[in-house]
Amino acid sequence: MTTTVTAKGQVTIPKAVRDLLGIVPGSKVTFHKAADGAVLLTRTDGKQPASRFRRLRGHAGKGLDTDAIMALTRGEE
């Protein structure tokens, strides 16, 4: 992923990276220089990103009751 530095020295953190680290507006991040010269971005506010399963919780809809499920499995309409 590539991003451009602005005249003020600012960059936009790519969405995929923000999603991976759970970075949202107000999140605190730190930049670290690794021994090999790479720069690492980490979250420093102590919050863990929501798991991919937690983010999906409640998105399945109302669902079917037991009678409706049994009717489907029996081929009834």
Image (cartoon, rainbow, N blue to C red):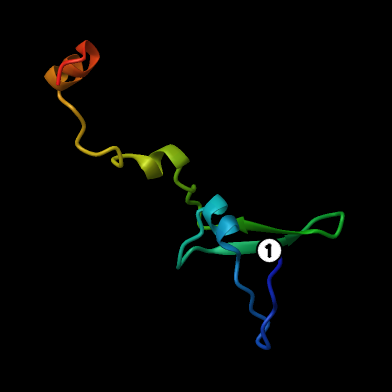
11 left or right of 62? right
**How many other residues sit within 10 Å of disc 1, few (<14), some (14-19) or many (≥20)?**
few
**What is the quadrant of the N terminus in the image?**
bottom right
Residue at position x 21%, y 32% in the image: 63
Residue at position x 46%, y 41% in the image: 52
Residue at position x 85%, y 60% in the image: 37
Residue 29 position by quadrant: bottom right
Most extreme residue toward the top is: 74
Residue at position x 68%, y 63% in the image: 31
Type of amino acid at the residue the image marks with label 1: Phe
Where does the image place residue 17, in percent across and percent down from the top left? 60, 57
Would you name the residue on which mark 1 appears? 31
Where does the image place residue 71, in percent across and percent down from the top left? 16, 16
Most extreme residue toward the bottom is: 7
Where does the image place residue 60, in percent across and percent down from the top left? 29, 37
60 left or right of 39? left
Q: Is residue 4 above or below residue 43?
A: below
Assign a secondary structure to mark 1: strand
**What is the quadrant of the C terminus in the image?**
top left
Q: Is residue 25 above or below residue 22?
A: below
Q: Is residue 60 above or below residue 20?
A: above
46 left or right of 1? left
Where does the image place residue 20, in percent across and percent down from the top left? 56, 51
How many numbered marks are there?
1
Foreground of the two, 63 or 4: 63
Residue 34 position by quadrant: bottom right
